[in-house]
Amino acid sequence: MQQSVNTGICRPLTSIVSVMSLTLLFLISIFFSTVSYAEQWVLGIPKDDRPPLTYTQDGKHVGLIIDIVREVGRRIDVDIKIEVVGASERRKGFVKGQYVIECCIIEGWRTRPEEIAIQLFSDPVLQIQDIFIFPPHQAFPISSMESLKDKEVGTIRGYSYKGEENFGSRVDHESVLPLLQGISSGRVDVGIFQRRAAAFHSRQSKLNLTFGPLHHEVQASIRLHKNKAEYLPEINAAIRDMYSDGTFKSLSDQHSSWMRK
C-alpha cells in the first residue's frame, strides 16, 4: 500500500517537472529566436579623423556619430557594425544597399537623382557648421557664393556643397587632411570644411590657416535606405527619447574631451 501511495505522488510531481522543463525550453527558444532576428547594419565612417564626430582613440574608431547610431540601433534592436570607407564609396554603396544607415547627414548633401530615389531622413540629430578656410593672410570677402566664380575651391571628393555651381573650379581631395594641407600651402584659393574638425586638424598638424565666415549651418539627420523604411518611425521615436532622457547631452559631453588630447 505504501509503495502505491508513493507512486501516485511521484506521477504528478513528474508531470509538473516535465511541464516546467518544457515551459523553460520554450522561453529560452523564444529568447534566442528574438536575438537572432536582430538585424545587422553597416555604418560607413570616414578614413580620416573628424572629431568629435569620428576619430581614433587608443587604436579604436570612436566618436559622437558612432555612439549616436549604435544607441539608436540598440533601441530599435539592430546591431551596428563599423566600416572605414571613403566618401565616394559610401555614397555608391548606399545607393546599392550595401549601407542602409548614415549619420549625420544634411539632406542637401545627397541630391543625386539615384540618391533621392532611395533615401529617407530622420528627425534632426545634430547641428553642423561648414566654414570657409583660407590660406594664411589670403582671406577675401565673400558677400555671396558668386564671389567664388573665379576661385579654385578646395573640396572633398564625393561631397556635395551648397552653391557649388558658383565655384570657379572645384579641386577635390581624398580626405580632410590633404584638403587642409592644400589650403595651407595656397594650392587653392579657399576651402570648405566643418569648423570643429578643421580646428582639430590644424592644431594636430600645426597648419597655418585662416578661418573665415560661415558657409552653411544646418541640422543633420540619420539617412536611411528606403528598403528599411519600416524602421523610420522607430528611429524617430528613439531620437525623441534620447533628447528627453538626456542621452544626446551625455554622449556630447563624453566626446568633448577630444579637444584636450
Image (tube, rainbow, N blue to C red):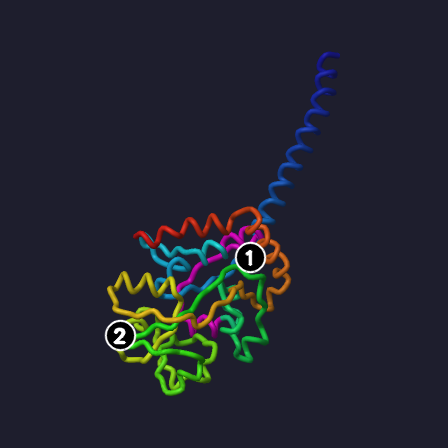
Q: Amino acid at mark 1?
A: Glu
Give the extent of the magenta segment. Answer: 70-93
Q: Amino acid at mark 2?
A: His
**Left or right of 56, for residue 20:** right
Above or below residue 166? Residue 24 is above
Residue 196, position as x, y percentages in the image = 38, 62
Above or below residue 70? Residue 149 is below
Whether residue 37 is visible, yes or no, is no
Residue 188, position as x, y percentages in the image = 31, 80
The disc label shown at residue 39, or none: 1
- Could you tell which of marks 2 and 1 lies nearer the N-terminus? 1
Q: Quadrant of residue 174?
A: bottom left
Dot 1: what SS?
Answer: strand
Q: CA distance from mark 2 to mark 1?
A: 52 Å
Q: How many marks?
A: 2
**Is label 2 or label 1 in front?**
2
Pick whichever, 25 or 233, lies toward us: 233
Question: In the image, what residue occupies the spot 36% across and 80% down?
Answer: 153
Question: In the image, what residue occupies the spot 31% across and 52% down?
Answer: 260
The residue indicated by pointer 2 is: 137
